[in-house]
Image (tube, helix red, strand yellow):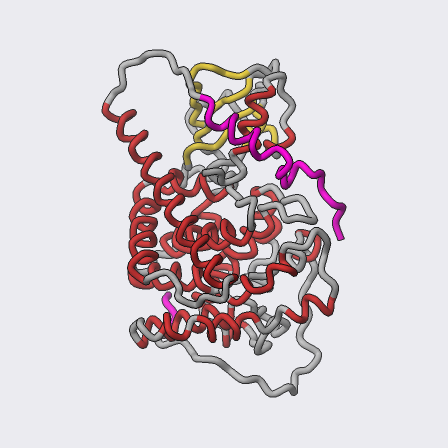
Amino acid sequence: MRIADILSPKNLKKKETPSQNQDKKIETPLQETKKEEPTPEKPSPRLFPKEYVEDLKKIVKIPEKPKPQIQTQPQIQKKVASKKAKEIYSALINCTEKLVKQILDQNHALPKIEEIDNIITLSMENLEIEPEKLLIFFERSTLENYIIAHIANVTILSIATSQELGWSKDRQYTVALGAWLHDTGLILHKDLYSRNEELSAEEKKSLQDFPLMSLSILKGFLDKLSIERRAIIKNIILQTQEKNLGEGYPFQLVKSQISKEAQLVRLCDIYEAITHPRPYRDRELPNRALRDMGTLSGETFDGELIKALWGALTLFPPGTYMELNTGEIAQVIGLNKKSPTQPVVKVIISADGKTVKENKTIDLSRQNEFKIKKAIDECHLKTGDIKLALKIKAQKWWLK
């Protein structure tokens, strides 16, 4: 993971320059086994609302009182799909939390491969059928330790992006497992990545050994995998922090030396970091982050991978909020792959700032009278309904 302070939107836009030390001998890690397929201001304390977590939990648990209605079969299926997606994401968070705890406790008895294997397989199936059901949870963060949700989110997005590329199921699975493991060594540096201020140059440099540390910690775990899968995952672990022009670490590789799988996980890692808050900075809105990263296609990021990321998320990913031309506030609940700028949304706040009680769903690709005015940060919504505002803010955090 490129620590969030390294990956601020401001730094992303800077043009990379070739390494000054071109003559430096590079120790190259394992190569791919197959040929490739055709300084910001500190945010408001509200970003990490630990002081009122208990209040948020109470708000989240407030029972809904929907109007009695006859459920049709499609409605029932959608509810079941949503529930299943939540269970999958919860299982992934729990498994990742266990991984983080064991590493921090220096207990290297990692979760059994069967546990994460089942979660990855279910995630692949869910994302293939109804991607928005699981991708909507990508917006979540974890209060206790942000790296838990970060690892889970990068795993989910890596699967979705590899599916958009048309990669085989075996390759999708391998990329997902590599994404889940790639930050293992970083977990031990909690004192640094949890800082409430930007790291110094010396502190950033001290993190550059974590890919090698990850490999050391995971040796017993990786030895249980097939030779081919182990080689791909080792490349992901060692190369995710490398940059196309040779300015990354730990080996200062250039694009031609970095595996496609590692480049994909790196892209997902950076996008996740930019679009989620960190202790010392606010987040970037998803649509702006996607546009900024798109401008670096071909130089900083592989163009094919950028296109796949856009295809998986569209310009307005599931879970994001927007203001419509009517003055209403809506949340994206469905994707239109053929019309990536016109998602399916659910109106939650009326133009006069009141909570919308009825289920008002709009397919922007079909109802042309509705337009997107702008994307918004739901944590800064202005509404007279304090309970709704708190509930929306609470949904940014994974609260069990």
Residue 359 place in picture, x, y as percent = 42, 18
Q: Residue at the location (40% across, 41% down)?
A: 337
In the displayed structure, would residue 339 be above or below residue 233? above
Question: Per the image, is 27 magenta?
Answer: no
In the displayed structure, would residue 206 be above or below residue 284? below
Please tell me which residue lies in front, 204 or 26.
204
Q: As drawn, is 337 to the left or to the right of 145?
A: left
Stretch of the chain drawn in magenta: 35-62
In the displayed structure, would residue 268 be above or below residue 252? above
Q: Is residue 376 visible?
A: no
Q: Which corner quadrant of the image does residue 352 belong to?
A: top right
Residue 68 place in picture, x, y as percent = 33, 12
Please tell me which residue lies in front, 181 or 110.
110
Q: Which corner quadrant of the image does residue 67 belong to?
A: top left
Q: Residue at the location (60% across, 20% down)?
A: 386
Q: Residue at the location (48% across, 48% down)?
A: 310
Q: As drawn, is 78 to the left or to the right of 302?
A: left
Residue 84 place in picture, x, y as percent = 32, 39
Q: Residue at the location (54% across, 37% down)?
A: 396
